[in-house]
Amino acid sequence: MRVTLRVNGRMHDVDVEPEDTLLSVLRSDLGLTGSKFGCGEGQCGACTVLVDGQAMRSCVLRVDALASKEVTTIEGLAQGERLHPVQEAFLDAEAFQCGYCTPGMVMATVALLRANARPSAQDIARAMDRNVCRCGTYSRIVKAVQIAAERTRATSSAGVSR
């Protein structure tokens, strides 16, 4: 069947099978390989994308249910050469080693900060709880989220939106 998806602000017509996941379409059909296949069961968070602004696991989302939704991947965050503040914070805090989980962590952070501009350490832990980092850089990830929250608030209060 043919489905039209809105991904990163662009419309894409794709031929899909009823069982195709969003992750498989993003990676195989659209060439957006930032979202990673981890567990395939929606448990590790490596495949996290935003669907209508909410963090969702793309490995368990059937693509045919997303025709009227806005999907944002890690590739859709930067504006040209300018990284999103969350991406910059992850770099500045050195919040990754191998980087496999980083796109999912970044997307989960973007969703968190859209819902809660002043997350506590508990809020961050709760929001990131199901994102697995096999390298164990959790303290740096928390630091990155805190930096991103501070920068996002500063940008918002200066009248600049993202």
Image (cartoon, rainbow, N blue to C red):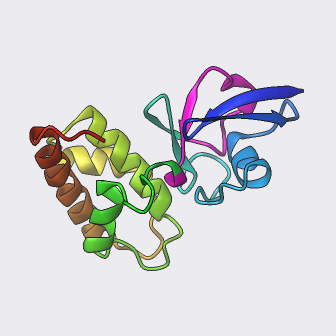
Task: Give the quarter of the figure containing the N terminus.
Answer: top right
- Magenta highlight on residue 93: no
For residue 34, which quarter of the picture? bottom right
| Residue drawn where x is 43% and y is 79% of the image | 97
Q: What span is in magenta?
A: 57-75
Residue 127 percent coordinates (x, y):
33, 44
Tell me how many marks there are.
0
Q: Is residue 62 magenta?
A: yes
Seen at 22% across and 36% down, the residue is 116
Indicate left or right for 162 with 57 as reference. left
Q: Position of residue 162 (x, y in %)?
A: 31, 42
User: Where's residue 142, x and y in %?
Assistant: 25, 61
Note whether 159 is above or below 120 in the view shown.
Answer: above
Question: Which residue sits at x=20%, y=47%?
Answer: 152
Quadrant in which residue 60 is drawn:
top right
Q: Is residue 111 left or right of residue 134?
A: left
Residue found at x 35% / y 54%: 84
Is residue 9 placed above or below 43 in the rendered structure? Answer: above
The relative height of residue 72 versus residue 105 in the rendered view (above or below) is above
* Residue 62 appears left or right of 120: right
Q: Position of residue 41 (x, y in %)?
A: 65, 47
Q: Residue 133 falls in which quadrant of the image?
A: bottom left
Q: Nearer the viewer, residue 2 or 115?
A: 2
